[in-house]
Image: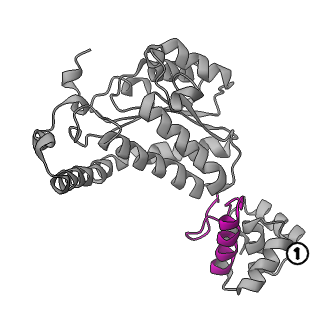
């Protein structure tokens, strides 16, 4: 497989003596290596930008964002998808994560699952993939067959495709319309791609989902106004967001939070435009769900 040619598999010359270091020395070396990740991601911003635009286009067209990967890469995609639901108030179907081997692979390695192109195709088939969707294949090595199979199938149905790899000239890149490649150097611990590669992938996924959600009106100024208040902490955060957005006091925020049926965005529009709930709903619809368009 020529793994020795992959940056993610090379030995890091800065950490050859890990087993001889003190805890303090190891922590300092690991921190220095981690600092290289954000700089590597910065180099890939021109590759990331068109992917964000494509995700926004997909959402506006009624499509879904689907991540797929194996091992750590797959887990990170599942995590980002799951966190979009409470953070941005979207349905679990709108952003989904697929991991080779299915749900049990989140905690237990499923032998051979990532080596099957057919499995990648099948998982997308089971989701009823359409041309409205965007599929993002994630692979630190940049060569995972499961991801390649998924990207080939996605292209065949006319879906938009993108990829994230932590090696240059990655094998998966030619299968994606919008490939993202970064090189953060060899891992702190040789071949352990849950470290720098995983951090790089997480940073990119944060960008893709967060900035795409900004692009469809899920954010007002820098406030997450579509947050779902599913627990006591989030109820209090919701009220605080209303206070920040409208400069009202806690009591007023609480009143409008209740009037709006715990819909933070709706409560803000009601306050800022002095509108009833029904009027605020119409204003949001006319403004394409952007608070700024209702003002």
Q: Nearer the viewer, residue 21 or 127?
A: 21
Asked whether residue 164 appears in the rendered view, the answer is yes
At numbered mark 1, what does the secondary structure look like: helix, strand or loop?
loop
- Total residue callouts: 1
Question: Which part of the image, by quadrant, shows the C terminus?
Answer: bottom right
Give the side of residue 83 with respect to residue 166, left or right.
right
Q: Position of residue 68 (x, y in %)?
A: 51, 30
Horizontal relation, residue 5 to residue 141: left or right: left
Quarter holding the N terminus? Answer: top left
- Residue 204's place in the image compared with 277, above or below, is above
For this view, does 238 lie left or right of residue 275? left
Residue 51 location in percent, x, y? Answer: 48, 42
Residue 218, above or below 247: above
Query: Was residue 238 drawn as part of the magenta stretch in this picture?
Result: yes
What's drawn in magenta, residue-wise?
217-244
Query: Residue at the spot x=51%, y=38% of the render?
Result: 77
What residue do we see at 32% from left, 42% from top? 195
Say which quarter of the image contains residue 239.
Answer: bottom right
Camera-nearest residue between 234 and 124: 234
Q: Is residue 159 magenta?
A: no
User: Which of these two is toward me, 226 or 175?
Assistant: 226
Q: Coloring scheme of the render?
A: one colour
Q: Which residue is mark 1?
A: 276
């Amino acid at each position: 497989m020529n793994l020795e040619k992959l940056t993610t598999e090379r030995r890091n010359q800065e950490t050859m003596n890990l087993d001889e270091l003190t805890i303090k020395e190891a922590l300092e070396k690991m921190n220095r290596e981690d600092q290289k990740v954000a700089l590597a991601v910065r180099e890939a911003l021109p590759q990331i930008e068109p992917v964000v635009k494509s995700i926004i286009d997909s959402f506006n067209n009624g499509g879904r964002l689907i991540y797929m990967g194996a091992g750590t890469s797959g887990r990170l995609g599942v995590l980002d998808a799951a966190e979009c639901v409470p953070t941005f108030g979207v349905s679990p179907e709108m952003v989904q994560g697929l991991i080779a081997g299915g749900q049990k692979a989140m905690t237990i390695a499923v032998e051979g699952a990532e080596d099957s192109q057919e499995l990648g195709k099948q998982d997308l088939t089971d989701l009823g993939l359409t041309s409205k969707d965007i599929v993002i294949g994630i692979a630190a090595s940049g060569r995972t067959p499961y991801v390649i199979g998924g990207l080939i199938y996605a292209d065949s149905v006319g879906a938009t495709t993108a990829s994230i790899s932590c090696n240059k000239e990655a094998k998966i890149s030619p299968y994606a319309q919008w490939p993202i490649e970064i090189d953060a150097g060899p891992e702190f611990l040789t071949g352990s791609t849950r470290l720098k590669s995983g951090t790089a992938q997480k940073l990119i996924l944060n960008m893709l989902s967060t900035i795409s959600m900004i692009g469809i009106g899920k954010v007002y100024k820098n406030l997450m106004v579509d947050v779902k208040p599913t627990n006591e902490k989030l109820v209090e955060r919701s009220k605080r967001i209303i206070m920040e957005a409208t400069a009202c006091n806690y009591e007023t925020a609480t009143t409008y939070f209740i009037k709006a049926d715990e819909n933070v965005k709706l409560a803000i529009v009601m306050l800022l435009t002095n509108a009833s709930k029904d009027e605020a709903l119409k204003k949001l619809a006319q403004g394409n769900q952007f608070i700024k368009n209702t003002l």
